[in-house]
Image (cartoon, rainbow, N blue to C red):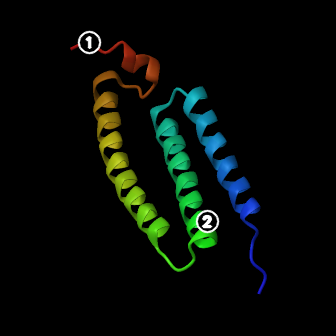
Amino acid sequence: MNEVPVTHILFLSTALFFIGMYGLFTRRNMITMLMAVELILNSVNINFVAFNKYLYPGKLDGVFFTIFIITIAAAEAAVAIAIIINLYRSHNSIDVEDASEMKY
């Protein structure tokens, strides 16, 4: 059975990370910014699993960190979507520029 080299996995993770950073810094829509943050977190998860497999194959520390990050990302997504819905109800837009003009 042929194994995938760690360089290929790290290249994929790096590509996901930079796509997420590009989406985070160039988009104004809050939904796409949330998706970009999720891409960044998934690239970190790929790194944890890859390094766990190649450096410590008998341990599951990287997998446990990944499960913890997935749990935190789900909670973060739920809170962020609630904030976005509230912002849309008050301003009829989910643009970041409109959120900066919010008055209380």
Contact? badges 2 and 1 (CB < 8 Å): no
> Residue type at mark 2?
Ala
How packed mark 2 is, by other alpha carbons closer than 10 Å (few <14, some 14-19, many 20 or more), is many
Q: Residue at x 55, y 66 (%)?
A: 49
Vertical placement of 48 versus 95: above or below? below
Question: Quick one: 31 or 49, which is closer to the camera?
Answer: 49
The image position of residue 47, as x and y in percent, is 59, 58
Question: Splitting the image into 4 quarters, where does residue 67 fall?
Answer: bottom left
The image position of residue 63, as x and y in percent, is 47, 69
The image position of residue 62, as x and y in percent, is 49, 65
Residue that badge 1 annotates? 103
Question: Quick one: 72 or 23, which is closer to the camera?
Answer: 72
* 16 relative to 24 in the view: left or right: right
* 39 relative to 81 in the view: left or right: right
Residue that badge 2 annotates? 50
Work out which quarter of the rendered image holds the C terminus and state it: top left
Sequence-first disc among 2 and 1:
2
Q: Residue at x 70, y 48 (%)?
A: 15
Question: Quick one: 47 or 74, which is closer to the camera?
Answer: 47
Vertical placement of 23 versus 43: above or below? above
Q: Secondary structure at mark 2?
A: helix
Toward the left, the furthest residue is 104
> Residue type at mark 1?
Lys
